[in-house]
């Protein structure tokens, strides 16, 4: 047994470590969540880390400001396979995220990333829930934004397992949150048909009927991908 006792994990210590600051109060100032004289509180809503996916564990928490307004946050811990360097995997995730953000894809606000951890905005609602609660007109606007997002992913050569899997929303947008193995690297040659099928399935699963004329009028980018998919088959 080691003669040095391991200190228990705390959220405060983790926030200081990921931002290279002395304490969690300095961490909040460093990432722009608070001014030097502000007083914010940390609120935990879970006791332990939870499995977020095949490559991550997640920990959700809130900050509460002096006006009692809550801001939701999430820590993601990278857990790659045996023999895979954590910092290499984290760098790949951040690189993909940066590339997609540079072409207009909405991503969660990033506060800090280091030591195999990502600290970012915690999105409020899965896209499918936002769609179900939206009016028909707003749902179609969101679908148009989804089409733009998918086109950007396609143009950058991403070949995800499912292009419409695990999308979230702030209510007015479509946000991509997973930049790991399911998304994969850029620069591939994905099949346009995969994107078209995923888009159409997502619309159907959320009870939004789209005919070919609808697609042409509302989401011309997906229509263009449909034509590209047909060309690939021929």
Image (spheres, rainbow, N blue to C red):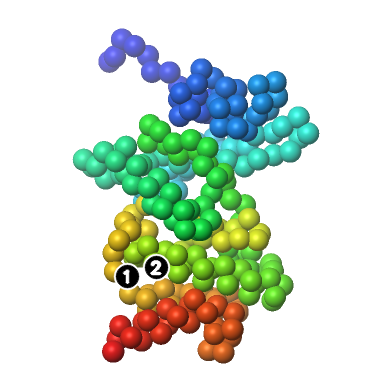
Q: Residue furthest toward the right? A: 67
Q: Name the residue under label 1.
A: 190
Position above or below: 180 against 32: below
Q: Which mark is residue 154?
A: 2
Q: Sequence-wise, which precedes: disc 1 or disc 2?
A: 2
Q: Quadrant of residue 204?
A: bottom right
- Check the image and report above or below for 51 versus 31: below
Q: Are marks 1 and 2 in contact (CB under 8 Å)?
A: yes
Q: Residue at x 46, y 68 (%)?
A: 150
Residue 226: mark in rendering:
none
Please tell me which residue lies in front, 212 or 115.
212
Name of the residue lying farthest toward the left: 83
Image location (x, y in percent) of residue 156: 37, 62
The residue under the point 42% across, 82% down is: 226
Q: Where is residue 17 in the image (x, y as percent from the top left)?
A: 45, 25
Q: Nearer the viewer, residue 222 or 59?
A: 222
Q: Tell me what residue is drawn at x 50 percent, y 21 percent.
A: 21
- Residue 13, visible in the rendered structure: no
Q: Can residue 36 be seen in this view?
A: yes
């Amino acid at each position: 047994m080691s003669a040095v006792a391991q200190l228990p994990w705390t959220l405060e210590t983790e926030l200081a470590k990921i931002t290279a600051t002395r304490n969690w109060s300095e961490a909040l100032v460093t990432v722009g969540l608070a001014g030097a004289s502000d007083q914010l509180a940390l609120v935990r809503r879970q006791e332990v880390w939870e499995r977020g996916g095949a490559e991550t564990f997640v920990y959700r928490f809130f900050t509460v400001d002096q006006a009692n307004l809550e801001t939701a946050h999430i820590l993601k811990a990278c857990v790659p396979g045996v023999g895979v360097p954590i910092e290499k995997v984290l760098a790949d995730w951040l690189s993909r995220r940066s590339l997609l953000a540079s072409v207009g894809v909405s991503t969660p606000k990033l506060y800090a990333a280091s030591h195999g951890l990502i600290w970012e905005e915690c999105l409020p609602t899965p896209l499918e829930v936002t769609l179900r609660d939206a009016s028909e007109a707003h749902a179609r606007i969101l679908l148009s934004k989804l089409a733009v997002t998918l086109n950007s992913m396609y143009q950058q050569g991403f070949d995800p397992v499912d292009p419409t899997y695990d999308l979230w929303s702030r209510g007015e947008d479509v946000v991509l949150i997973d930049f790991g193995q399911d998304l994969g690297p850029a620069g591939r040659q994905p099949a346009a048909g995969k994107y078209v099928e995923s888009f159409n399935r997502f619309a159907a699963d959320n009870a939004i009927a789209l005919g070919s004329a609808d697609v042409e009028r509302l989401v011309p980018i997906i229509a263009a991908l449909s034509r590209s998919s047909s060309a690939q088959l021929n």
